């Protein structure tokens, strides 16, 4: 059952709610309509405003656009994810940069010594992954805001993807296909938990 909030409770109109949430689906096939570099930049320029601890911004993206890069990626995907990845006009490798602290003098300038303190912090890798995961959620919404469908996946050989595509201490956390949906793109819509099942008010 689709629950629609009474008018006035949410700041965005019903069509925006549908675009970003209610009608948005995980696509399993894609059309051959390209996703342009300008679209990708516009998506990132929304996603970069996601909240992260200490303004860490550990999200790093590798945009797999060319046929040659896609051929390198496909064998590293789980078998069930290869066909959809082959059909997507854009695939984003989503990574958490464990060396995010190197940017803290610029992104968190009011905390003197933040880079040095975080360099020695054993919790830095977990912090990178947690905050990049928050940004991943925003990335999916940013793709939807561009009128595209997103297909996030965790089925891939992370170590192999890191070796083939990533740099330094970047750790792969997801692969996301993006584009206009193709034929038979959707599985049947599965139920969602209702408020009373998921929220405890104390």
Image (cartoon, helix red, strand yellow):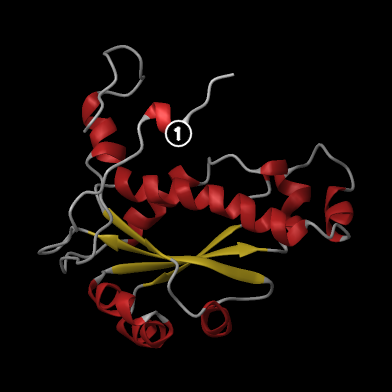
Check the image and report above or below for 158 versus 191: below
How many C-alpha atoms fall within 10 Å of the one at disc 1: few (<14), some, or many (≥20)? few
Residue 62 horizontal side relative to residue 35, left or right: right
**Residue at the image point whose x is 36% and y is 19% from the top:** 11
The image position of residue 169, as x and y in percent, is 69, 72
Q: How many marks?
A: 1
> In terms of depth relative to the viewer, which is nearer, 71 or 126?
126
Query: Residue 64's x, y, as percent?
Result: 39, 73
Residue toward you, 7 or 41: 7
Q: Is residue 180 above or below residue 155?
A: above
Is 93 on the left or on the right of 183, as rendered?
A: right
Residue lying at 15% horizontally and 66% vertically, measured from the top left: 31
Judging by the rendered image, the residue that carries numbered circle 1 is 198
Q: Residue furthest top?
A: 8
Q: Quadrant of the N terminus?
A: top left
Of residues 61 and 151, the one drawn nearer to the viewer in this rendering: 151
Q: Residue furthest left?
A: 183
Q: Is 171 above or below relative to 114? A: below
* Quarter of the figure that contains the C terminus: top right
Query: Which residue is depicted at the point 29% across and 20% down?
Result: 5
- Measured as percent of width and height from the top left, residue 113 is found at 89, 48
């Amino acid at each position: 059952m689709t629950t629609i909030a009474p008018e006035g409770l949410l700041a965005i109109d019903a069509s925006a709610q549908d675009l970003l949430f209610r009608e948005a689906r995980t696509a399993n096939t894609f059309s051959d309509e390209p996703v342009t570099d300008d679209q990708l930049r516009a998506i990132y320029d929304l996603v970069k405003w996601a909240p992260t601890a200490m303004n860490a911004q550990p999200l790093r993206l590798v945009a797999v656009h060319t046929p040659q890069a896609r051929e390198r990626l496909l064998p590293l995907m789980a078998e069930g994810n290869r066909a959809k990845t082959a059909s997507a006009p854009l695939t984003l490798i989503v990574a958490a940069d464990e060396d995010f602290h190197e940017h803290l003098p610029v992104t968190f300038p009011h905390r003197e010594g933040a880079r040095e303190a975080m360099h020695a912090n054993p919790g830095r890798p977990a912090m990178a992954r947690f905050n990049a995961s928050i940004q991943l959620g925003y990335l999916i919404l940013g793709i939807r805001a561009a009128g595209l469908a997103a297909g996030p996946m965790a089925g891939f050989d992370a170590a192999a993807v890191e070796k083939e595509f990533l740099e330094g201490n970047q750790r792969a956390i997801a692969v996301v296909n993006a584009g206009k949906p193709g034929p038979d793109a959707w599985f049947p819509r599965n139920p969602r938990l209702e408020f009373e099942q998921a929220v405890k008010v104390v």
